[in-house]
Each structure stands twice: as structure tokens, then as C-alpha cells.
């Protein structure tokens, strides 16, 4: 089964909001490019993160949400929770890293069309 990820979007662009189970990559500091899965999000905006990297998988790291960005892998099943495509679900068919943020091309379940989100 593919992972169910909920992605948060706003009409003006992607919000830096995470939910438990989301996948993210560190975007700043000496651990830049480290990928992991969100374990929890605190009210103050800090995110607990379980690295996917061998050797440190047993650790839980904490980062300010501003130091992380979501990432997607081809084949992930996602749900858009805000913005133009709110409520759409589909499968990620392409991932683009613009350097600023990740963009996902999603093949929507309901319309059978590709949509660009994030």
C-alpha cells in the first residue's frame, strides 16, 4: 500500500505546515538534505522528525518547521487539503525540486488529469 500523505496548500502558495506522517527534508543547517518522516508537531511550530538515513533511524530529531520542507516520491498517494485543488486525491507522477520548494505533479483520481500542486 502507498503512504497516504496529507499536503497543506493555500491559494497563495504552499504553507509550511506539517502533519504526523508527512515526509520532509531538512532545508537548512549541517543536516541539510536529510530526509525523514514527521512524528509530531508542537504548538510552538517545532517538528519532531524521524530520519530515514541508516545509522540514525532510531533517533528523533527536532527542528523548527521553517527548517524543513515537504518532499514527495513518485507513487505516493496524496490528498490536497486547501487551495484550488482542495479535496483532490491522486498519485504523484513527477516531482520537481525548484530549489525553493518541491512541486508535485499529481494524477488526480476524480478527474483523471494531471495537476501541479505545492
Image: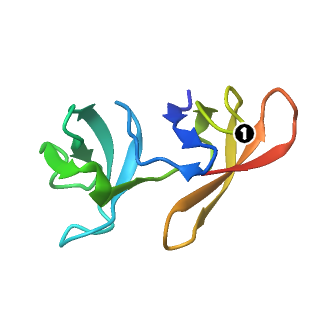
**Apparent side of residue 49 relative to residue 97 in the rendered image (left or right):** left
Front in this rendered view, residue 76 or 99 = 99
Above or below for 54 versus 38: below
Residue 101, given in percent of the width and then of the height, sits at 50, 63
Specify whether residue 73 is in view. Answer: no
Which quadrant of the figure contains the N terminus? top right
Residue drawn at (34%, 30%), measured in percent from left and top? 20
Task: Provide the secondary structure element on which disc 1 rests.
Answer: loop
Height in image: 9 above or below 93? Answer: above
| Mark 1, other Cα within 10 Å: few <14 / some 14–19 / many ≥20 | few
**Where does residue 32 sit, x and y in percent of width and height?**
28, 69
Q: In the image shown, does 28 or 73 lie closer to the viewer?
A: 28
According to the image, label 1 marks what residue?
84
Question: Looking at the picture, does residue 112 appear above or below residue 68?
Answer: above
Residue 91, picture quadrant: top right
Q: Which residue is drawn at 16% across and 55% down?
A: 55
For the point 19% across and 51% down, the residue is 63
**Percent from the top left, x then y, of residue 19?**
38, 32
Q: Position of residue 80 (x, y in %)?
A: 62, 34
Amino acid at each position: 500500500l502507498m503512504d497516504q500523505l496529507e499536503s497543506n496548500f493555500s491559494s497563495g502558495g504552499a504553507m509550511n505546515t506539517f502533519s504526523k506522517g508527512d515526509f520532509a527534508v531538512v532545508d537548512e543547517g549541517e543536516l541539510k538534505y536529510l530526509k525523514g518522516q514527521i512524528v509530531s508537531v508542537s504548538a510552538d511550530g517545532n517538528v519532531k522528525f524521524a530520519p530515514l538515513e541508516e545509522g540514525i533511524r532510531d533517533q528523533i530529531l527536532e527542528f523548527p518547521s521553517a527548517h524543513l520542507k515537504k518532499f514527495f516520491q513518485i507513487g505516493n498517494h496524496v490528498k490536497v487539503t486547501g487551495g484550488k485543488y482542495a479535496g483532490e486525491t491522486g498519485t504523484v507522477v513527477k516531482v520537481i525540486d525548484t530549489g525553493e520548494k518541491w512541486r508535485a505533479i499529481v494524477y488526480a483520481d476524480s478527474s483523471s488529469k494531471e495537476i501541479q500542486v505545492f
